[in-house]
Image: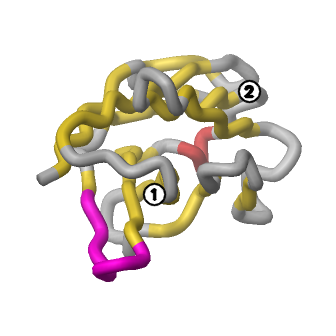
Amino acid sequence: QVQLVESGGGLVQAGGSLRLSCAASGSIRRSDTMGWYRQAPGKQREFVAVISDGGNTNYADSVKGRFTISRDNAKNWVYLQMDSLKPEDTAAYYCSLKRATPRVDYWGQGTQVTVSS
């Protein structure tokens, strides 16, 4: 089993920054892919960023150049540095762990980010 616990959300003005953290515990594998997704009210959950065990990253077009994902493999933490925040970034942000074999996804309970204009 895997447990993911997010922290770092809050209320920030447009143009500000926040850093989200996700602590992973349990049967973590070095090969697991870690990522962040978000869900705004009335919308489907959408991809934000992902990082592989080797440090390769991928971002949604909407956050490229503003958000940075990183991970600490020794401590099983993953981070999302969010800069130049916009009101449209307002959402619940979820940490994810994706395992290829067996194919399984784990999710945290989410942390709320609210960006005021």
Stretch in magenta: 100-106
Q: Residue type at mark 2: give it.
A: Asp
Q: Which residue is drawn at 73% across and 36% down?
A: 68
The mark found on residue 32 in the picture is: 1
Left or right: 91 with respect to 14? left
Discs 1/2, front:
1
Mark 1–mark 2 Cα distance, whole angstroms, equals 26 Å
Q: Residue at x 31, y 46 (%)?
A: 28
Q: Which residue is drawn at 31% across and 36% down?
A: 24
Q: Residue type at mark 1: give it.
A: Asp
The mark found on residue 58 in the picture is: none
Query: What count of labels does the image hold?
Result: 2
**Residue 26 visible in this rendered orientation of the protein:** yes
Left or right: 8 with respect to 79? left
The mark found on residue 83 in the picture is: 2
Which of marks 2 and 1 precedes in the sequence? 1
Q: Which residue is drawn at 30% across and 69% down?
A: 105
Left or right: 92 with respect to 73? left
Residue 57: quarter of image: bottom right
Magenta highlight on residue 63: no
The relative height of residue 88 versus residue 16 in the rendered view (above or below) is below
User: Which image quarter is the C terminus in?
Assistant: top right
